[in-house]
Image: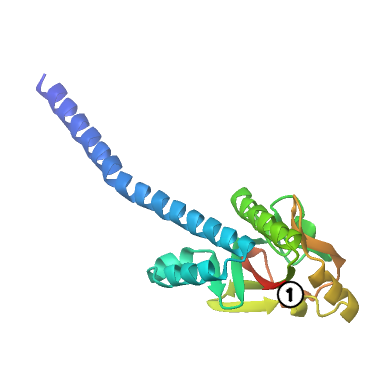
Amino acid sequence: MALAMRRTTLLCLILASLCSGVHAAEPAVKADLADLERRVEMERKTLTLLAEQDLEGLKKQATAISELKFADRQALPVRIRPSAVEFRFRGVFPGPAISNIEYVISKAGDKDHETMLAVNPAELKRLHELRNALNKLVGDGHVIRLDVRMLWNDQGRTHSEDLEDILALAPDKDRTTFTRQLLIDDSGMGAFNIVHDPLALPPVKQSAEVHVTVRVSQK
């Protein structure tokens, strides 16, 4: 009887400890979700201001971003500059065995053989929301220029390559046309099949980022 009671007491203590751990973790989970929702809302607001070309609103949004804590600002995948807005996409460089490049960003598992960055559905959704903003700008008669840069970490060092440098082996005319014809479709952001410089990309399959900077010429 005494042994059974001791076992029951021990079980209760273990369960109580587990439950206590779960309850202690709940505030942290809720805080993470709140931070994520805040980042999503800030990016969507930025997209709206960009699409409407609300320059005063963009200035205020830039101030709001600058007032964030360092860690929060680093986690936010958007930057507002005096003459441009930058969107950062995180994913995986599929590997050095890729053939010619057609996409700079694409859905993971779809265009991995010809893309610079394979992204998950959440990042692809962000890209499509950017597409909506760009379509409105074009529809309103604005001229858009997209600058693309890829970043990755190699043995503790950050590497950064501009798209034009990545396409350095392509003829000048093709390289210029590719950068000017970048479009966002259901699969991602790309133009047409073009040669690239393998040495300007990561040497192995690894995590990476592609930064898309949007510059808008006023009507």
* Residue 5 location, quadrant: top left
Where does the image place residue 143, in percent across and percent down from the top left?
75, 70
Kind of residue at badge 1: Leu
Residue sitting at 75 percent across and 52 percent down? 187
Report which quarter residue 195 is drawn in: bottom right
* Residue 207 shows in the view: no
Residue placed at 75% from the left, 62% from the top? 138
- Asked whether 109 or 63 is in front, the reply is 63
Q: Is label 1 in a helix, a strand or a loop?
A: helix
The residue labelled by disc 1 is: 163
Q: Quadrant of the N terminus?
A: top left
Residue at the image position 84 percent from the left and 76 percent from the top: 176
Residue 211, image x, y percentages: 63, 69
Can residue 214 be seen?
yes
Position of residue 180 in the picture relative to residue 72 (left or right) = right
Q: Nearer the viewer, residue 67 or 76?
A: 67
Q: Nearer the viewer, residue 83 or 95?
A: 83
